[in-house]
Image: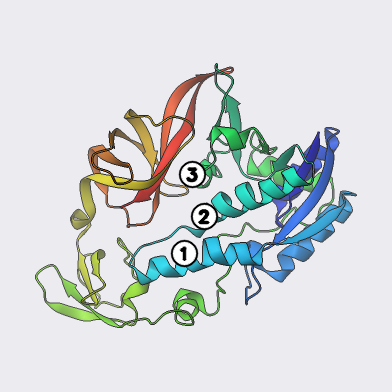
């Protein structure tokens, strides 16, 4: 099979390409150049492109660099900035997967005659009894990345491969070491790739939008302090508020952009019984009923009852009723729905859909 292997410069993608090559596939490596601005971390930095080139050379693979900078700006960076300006908390990794890796790159691969795109994600692709494919959790549950892949539909999964999905991170690093890959001991990237560690989120945003100082108050309205930019404050945040010590733990329970007011309270103020999702993506047909929902990349999945809401002429939404009180999720964050379905290998918990908190 002719496979285009996406090399980010990390150990996971390097080993994914190596495994495909070892299995006899015709593999060509490609690195997406996404960001032309300052970056010192993650898959957007200059060093990552160089690490990918070296890994491809060690594996004796042809290596190309595709410049998708305009697409990255349009689909990831600009929406990230707009979300903060509107008081939402975006997830740029989800949007990069949605629009870049599994749309722009997938379409480019098809035009070039490749049969599949492979990445180094810790996730598995399983086959249902009807022959359609779904995403299941990676074998290494601590590294599972199925959450950030929920926007892939069954159709797209027909042209996608996750070669390391059955491996643990330790096994990936061990295999890389056996091949003497420079990436074998390289740390995982965890930050937003187009924002430098040195300057941070606020410095990045203030180059593109006006940030507004605000006040911090308690739930009774008493002023407790100030924040330099309400646009970078997130629901549930505790650190960075610089409140006087000695009191019980206080968390952000509300951010009101029009009045530039951040309200803090105890952990009980973060609990809720339900939430609503919009911008829905389904692996195939929409589903409802009892299923497990995951609200962050490495968070626990918890049971809830999902009900479709198609009232009116607007876009469909989903109503989530938690079975036990749940910590509130910031507007704009992704919630992914998992259900147990019968596959050719038995019952598996698979991704059936997801959406953004309204």
Camera-side residue of 280 and 236? 280
On screen, residue 200 above or below 125: below
Q: How far apart are the two marked residues, 1 and 2, measured between alpha carbons?
A: 9 Å
> What colouring does the structure picture have?
rainbow
- The answer to which image quadrant residue 35 occupies is bottom right
Q: Secondary structure at mark 1?
A: helix
Q: Are marks 3 and 2 in contact (CB under 8 Å)?
A: no
The quarter of the image holding the N terminus is top right
Q: Position of residue 112 (x, y in %)?
A: 79, 46
- Specify whether 205 is left or right of 97: left
Residue at 81 percent of width and 57 percent of height: 64
User: Which of the two discs, 1 and 3, labels the residue nearer the N terminus?
Assistant: 1
Residue at which label 3 appears? 147
Q: Position of residue 156 (x, y in %)?
A: 60, 37
Q: Secondary structure at mark 3?
A: helix
Camera-side residue of 273 and 82? 82
Q: Position of residue 347 (x, y in %)?
A: 49, 19
Residue 95, numbered label: 2
Residue at 67 percent of width and 43 percent of height: 170
Residue 145, numbered label: none
User: Which of the two discs, 3 and 2, labels the residue nearer the N terminus?
Assistant: 2
Q: Are marks 1 and 2 in contact (CB under 8 Å)?
A: yes
Residue at which label 1 appears? 79
């Amino acid at each position: 099979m002719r496979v285009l292997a996406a090399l980010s410069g990390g150990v996971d993608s390097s080993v994914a390409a190596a495994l495909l090559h070892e299995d006899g596939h015709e593999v060509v490596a490609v690195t997406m150049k996404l960001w032309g601005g300052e970056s010192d971390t993650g898959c957007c930095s200059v060093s990552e492109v160089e690490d990918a080139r070296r890994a491809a050379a060690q594996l004796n693979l042809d290596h190309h660099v595709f410049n998708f900078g305009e697409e990255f700006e349009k689909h990831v960076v600009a929406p990230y900035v707009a979300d903060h300006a509107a008081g939402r908390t975006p997830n740029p990794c989800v949007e990069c997967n949605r629009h870049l890796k599994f749309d722009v790159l997938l379409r480019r691969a098809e035009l070039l005659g490749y049969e599949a795109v492979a990445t180094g994600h810790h996730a598995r692709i399983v086959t249902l009894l009807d022959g359609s494919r779904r995403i299941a959790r990676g074998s290494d549950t601590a590294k599972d990345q199925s959450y950030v892949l929920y926007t892939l539909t069954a159709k797209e999964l027909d042209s996608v491969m996750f070669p390391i999905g059955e491996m643990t991170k330790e096994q990936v690093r061990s295999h890389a070491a056996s091949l003497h890959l420079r990436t074998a001991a390289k740390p995982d990237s965890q930050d937003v790739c187009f924002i430098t560690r040195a300057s941070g989120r606020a410095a990045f945003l203030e180059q593109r939008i006006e940030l507004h100082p605000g006040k911090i108050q308690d739930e009774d309205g008493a002023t407790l302090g100030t924040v330099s930019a309400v646009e970078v404050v997130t629901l549930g945040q505790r650190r960075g508020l610089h409140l006087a010590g000695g009191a019980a733990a206080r968390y952000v329970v509300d951010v009101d952009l029009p009045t530039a007011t951040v309200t803090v309270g105890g952990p009980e103020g973060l609990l809720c019984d339900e939430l609503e999702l919009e911008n829905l993506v389904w692996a195939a047909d929409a589903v409802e009923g009892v299923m497990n929902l995951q609200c962050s990349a490495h968070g626990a999945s918890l049971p809830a009852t999902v009900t479709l809401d198609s009232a009116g002429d607007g876009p469909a939404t989903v109503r989530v009723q938690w079975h036990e009180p749940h910590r509130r999720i910031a507007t704009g964050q992704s919630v992914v729905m998992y259900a147990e379905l019968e596959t050719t290998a038995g019952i598996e918990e698979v991704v059936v859909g997801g959406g953004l908190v309204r």
